[in-house]
Amino acid sequence: MNTSLDATRQPLERAVHVPGFVYTSPEVFAREKERMFMKDWLCVAREEEIARPGDYMTVRVMDEPVVIVRDVTGTIHALANVCVHRGVEVAVGQGNAREFKCPYHAWTYDLTGQLLGAPFMNQTPGFDVQRCRLPRLGVGTWAGWVFVNFDAGAEPLETFLADFAKDVGFLKMEDCRLGTKLVLDLACNWKLVVENLIDVYHVQVVHAKSFGQHRGSPDRYPMHLRKYGGTCTIYEAAPMTPDGKTRFRRMPAVEDRADNFALSSHLFPNVQVIARSDNVHPLVIWPLAPDATRMIAYNLYPRQWAQEPDFAEKIQVYHDYLDLALCEDREMVASLQNGVGSSRFVPGRMSFLEKGIHHVLNAYLERVFDGVEPAR
């Protein structure tokens, strides 16, 4: 069987999955960083996670340290978290600060990244504090989310999100509050996580004991294909609770929809928004290594619901159930990684149910391999 990338580029009815090296090669992983994660707008946080002046949080994007901070005027900045002296990270974790001080030599920066002071550097000829600052990254916000971009020549966030905003903007995530946040480390390549989230084929098998029993047949998911490898499908599924019954009611944004309304939309390269009639649970996927991935799941609810006395008790039900569902996937994606790394692995034919995966993989191949077969 042909296992080259050209076999994946065939029309879906003739296509096969990509060969294993795409998921295991350090060289491919480095190319993904260079050609996608250092080029595209990346979702890094909820605005409410840095709500007050001085609030900050640190993230790592494929080993690139970044600090997201709200300054005293309320403006959000994205800065390279590397001191301009020796590169030490000037911020750690998440918190509130008036300034950032390098823990190595005490070089101090304001919340915009401007260097304020550098002990003893006044004795260094030509050194000018005013000309030193933490490198800026592109930053923008949409629907309550903070996005960053490492590429000074990137397209505007508005155009990058155009299709995605049309597909999921009506959910009004900007009017939602973050209820809980779940962080899950997975022993697999990041693309296997992305594919798994789009894969309707596996739901009634892997998730037979959880939400799979509350969803319709896998051939009833109309998959709409978008630019850059994006996808969107609106389908029927029960709320994400053990009994499939809501603990709230329909969200104001979807009051005109049925109780079994569900949506899943992929924003290339690493965001999946999944919604039900009563909550939205976006997932952000971060590559850590060729065989390691971190997934962050956010549970969002209409802001006004947070004032209800039993809000915390109710959202814990959704949190625990989502944790269960994602843990069902954990073993499967680890097994996928083991399989694609085997010398005996030969990629199989795609099913018509894998229309979304076929689209995502082909957009990926175009970006990473320029439409040609890589040297191995």
Image (spheres, helix red, strand yellow):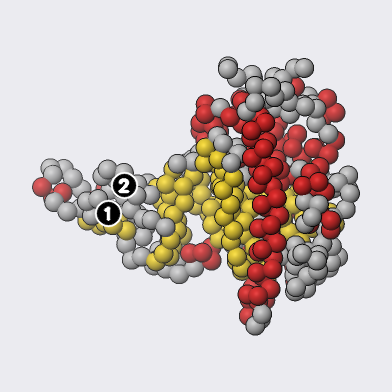
Looking at the picture, does residue 232 appear above or below residue 297? above
> What residue is at 73 percent from the left and 29 percent from the top?
17
Q: Quadrant of the N terminus?
A: top right
**Can you tell which mark lies on residue 88?**
2
Q: Quadrant of the C terminus?
A: top right
Q: Which residue is painted at 34% across and 49% down in the image?
A: 89
* Earlier-in-chain disc, 2 versus 1: 2
Image vertical order of residue 344 relative to residue 194, above or below: above
Label 1: few (<14), some (14–19) or many (≥20) C-alpha neighbours in 10 Å:
few
Q: Is residue 30 above or below residue 226?
A: above
Q: In screen coordinates, is 373 left or right of 79? A: right
Q: CA distance from mark 2 to mark 1?
A: 8 Å
Task: Determine contact: label 2, label 1, CB under 8 Å.
Answer: yes
Quadrant of res 323: bottom right
User: Which is nearer the eye, 170 or 354?
Assistant: 354
The residue under label 2 is which amino acid type?
A: Val
Q: Which residue is mark 1?
A: 103
- Amino acid type of the residue tagged 1 in the rendering: Pro
Foreground of the two, 34 or 323: 323
> In the picture provided, is 319 more to the left or to the right than 66?
right
Quarter occupied by residue 202: top right
Label 2 Cα neighbours within 10 Å, binned few <14 / some 14-19 / many ≥20: some
In the image, residue 330 above or below residue 21? below
